[in-house]
Every structure is written in C-alpha cells, then in structure tokens.
Image: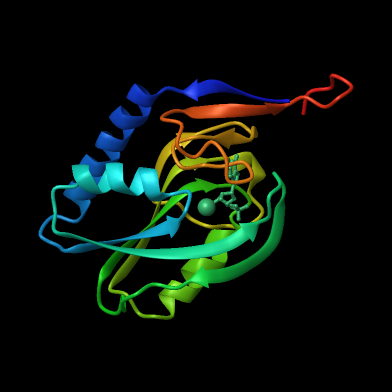
Amino acid sequence: METVSVMIPEERLLARVREMAEQITADYEGCELKLVCILKGSVFFTTELAKRIDLPIKLDFMSVSSYGDDTESSGRVRIVKDLDESIRGQHVIVVEDIVDSGRTLEFLLEMLKSRQPESLRLCTLLDKPSRRVTDVKVDYTGFEIPDEFVVGFGLDYAQKYRALPFIGKLSITKEDGETE
Ligand code: IMP
Ligand code: MG
C-alpha cells in the first residue's frame, strides 16, 4: 500500500519560490532569461517560478529519462525530447525538480554547455545532497531534504501523484507489513 504524508506544505513551497524568483530577478537585472524546464517533474515549479521573475522570460522544454518506474536511479540518461530553439548566446537557467545522484544534471549541463550559451546556471526546487555521486554545482536551491522518496508538485512515483499541491513523503508498505 502507498501512503503520502506532507513534508513541505504548499504555502511554504510558494513562499520559497517567491524568494528564489526575487534572487534570480536581482542576479539577472537588465537581462533576458531563458528557463529550460526539464519535463515532466519541473513543470509545476517552472511555471510558479517564471510568474514571479520580473524579467523578460523565454521558456523551452527538454525531456530526459534517467529513472524507470522505480525509486532507484539507473544511471542511464537519454534525451526523449530536445529543446525547440537554440540557446547560443543566451542566459540560461536549467530548472529541475530534484537533484538526487546528480547524474542527470551532469550529463545535461555538459551537453547544454557545448551549445555555447552566454551563461548557464542550475536551479532546483529540491536537493538531496546525501545522495550525490557527482560534483554538480547547484546555483539556486529551494529546499535541502533528507534521503526520502518524495512526490507531488510535479514529482512522481510511476507517473502518479504529480498534481499534489505539496511535497509529500511516499511510504510503500509491503504485504508483510514492512515499510520501505
Ligand atoms: P539523479 O540523476 O539521480 O540526480 O535523478 C534526478 C531525477 O530523478 C529527478 O529529476 C527526478 O525525476 C528523479 N528523482 C530523484 N529523486 C526523486 C524523488 O524522491 N521523487 C521523485 N523523483 C525523484
Ligand atoms: Mg526530473
């Protein structure tokens, strides 16, 4: 059986998103900014963030796959959908839902860097620093969380729970009553 308990309520998420947007607005004063949303998990975070950044914003979307329908990282990264437009000469922020091992981002940032943007930064709603196996540098972090599997606000478990308005901790109880 799967149960979800609230870890970060909606008001706290949105308050933090506002702070992050204010920071980004200040850091990129006078610039045009492109937000690269990593589908599908970052959709909710990206739209809330974009609405609160007081700069001219362009959006583009990319889909990569590093997870199957399980809670363990496979380490394999595959581009499922590439950006529609060039990022050459632009100020780009990659917007992620969560940085876990960092493998997805390590691959992605290297690839985007080779397309010669003017600048490239990383913004994530959640970070699980204890899980990191790469030295990916995160420029903007919403919340550092412990090593728990979380869902909601875009994050899924086997494509479920994305539309929950809060971040919740997922617990899976097996037949024998043991909790994962
Ligand atoms: P990484 O390559 O190990 O950093 O994995 C990053 C990706 O794994 C994220 O973009 C999510 O799609 C997924 N992921 C990692 N941890 C969680 C979690 O707790 N809940 C849901 N998805 C997760
Ligand atoms: Mg993701």
User: Left or right: where does residue 94 sit relative to residue 118?
Assistant: right
The quadrant of the picture occupied by the C terminus is top right
Residue at image position (35%, 80%) is: 116
Which residue is the extreme one toward the right?
Answer: 176
Residue 55: % across, % down: 14, 54
Q: Quadrant of residue 86?
A: bottom left
The quadrant of the picture occupied by the N terminus is top right
Residue at image position (43%, 49%) is: 42
Residue at image position (31%, 68%) is: 119
Residue 123: % across, % down: 39, 50
Residue 121: % across, % down: 37, 60
Front residue of this view, candidates 50 and 174: 174
Residue at image position (89%, 22%) is: 176
Front residue of this view, candidates 103 and 67: 67
In this picture the colour scheme is: rainbow
Above or below — where is 155 with respect to 177? below
User: Left or right: where does residue 174 sit relative to residue 27?
Assistant: right
Front residue of this view, candidates 76 and 142: 76
Front residue of this view, candidates 5 and 24: 5
Number of marks: 0
